[in-house]
Amino acid sequence: MNVSARTEYACLALLELALHYEACQPVRVRQIADAHGIPPQFLMQILLQLKAAGLVTSTRGASGGYRLVRDPAELSLGEVMQVMDGPLHGADRNGASGTPLSRALRQTWDRAAAAEREWLNATSFADLIAAVGEPAEQMFYI
């Protein structure tokens, strides 16, 4: 799965905003940029795109910054990927033509892409925040 830097940074920014959602605290661009090594100007462009999509809101001033518009449990990775990169599609190879083998392979790619879309749409930012809070002791090694 290829994830653009733009989408990766958007998700990191939204995770930072999700951490402050309950407190209704705006988060400054510089704070997010410094925490994740994101170029501030690039992050500003990303946040403006997220704002245009209605995912975040901004407040000006000394105590200003960005906040999530919705509860992190209501915002999915799939939605953010679609906002940042456009609709998630399956593999675009050979169309409906081609040999029986290439059509069988295409169907497999399409099923994999559908499963990926389903998983991304089912994974919320609240799920990701909760996963960060899980203790490392729960990892099992064989």
Image: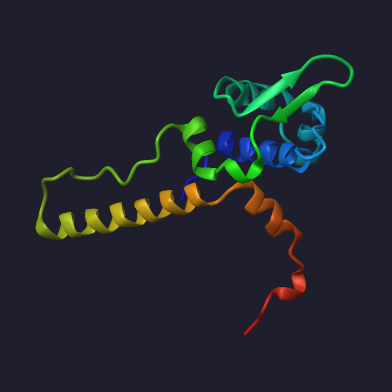
Task: Name the outermost residue toward the right.
Answer: 62
Query: On the rendered structure, is 131 left or right of 64?
Result: left
- The residue closer to the viewer here, 34 or 47, is 47
Residue at the extreme top of the image, as rendered: 61
69 versus 123 height, above or below: above
**Residue at left offset 62%, top offset 40%:** 11
Quarter of the view holding residue 32: top right
Disc tally is 0
At x 74%, y 40%, the residue is 16
| Viewer-closest of 1 and 11 | 11
Q: Where is residue 30 in the image (x, y as percent from the top left)?
A: 81, 28
Q: Looking at the picture, tell me which residue is in the foreground, 16 or 33.
A: 16
Quadrant containing the C terminus in the rendered view? bottom right
Residue at 78 percent of width and 40 percent of height: 22
Q: Position of residue 120 (x, y in %)?
A: 49, 49
Percent x, y of residue 94: 18, 45
Q: Is residue 3 left or right of residue 59?
A: left
In this view, which residue lies farthest toward the bottom?
A: 142
Quadrant in which residue 75 is drawn: top right
Could you tell whether 124 is left or right of 61 in the image? left
- x, y percent for residue 73: 62, 46
Residue at 66% in and 49% down: 126
Here the colouring is: rainbow
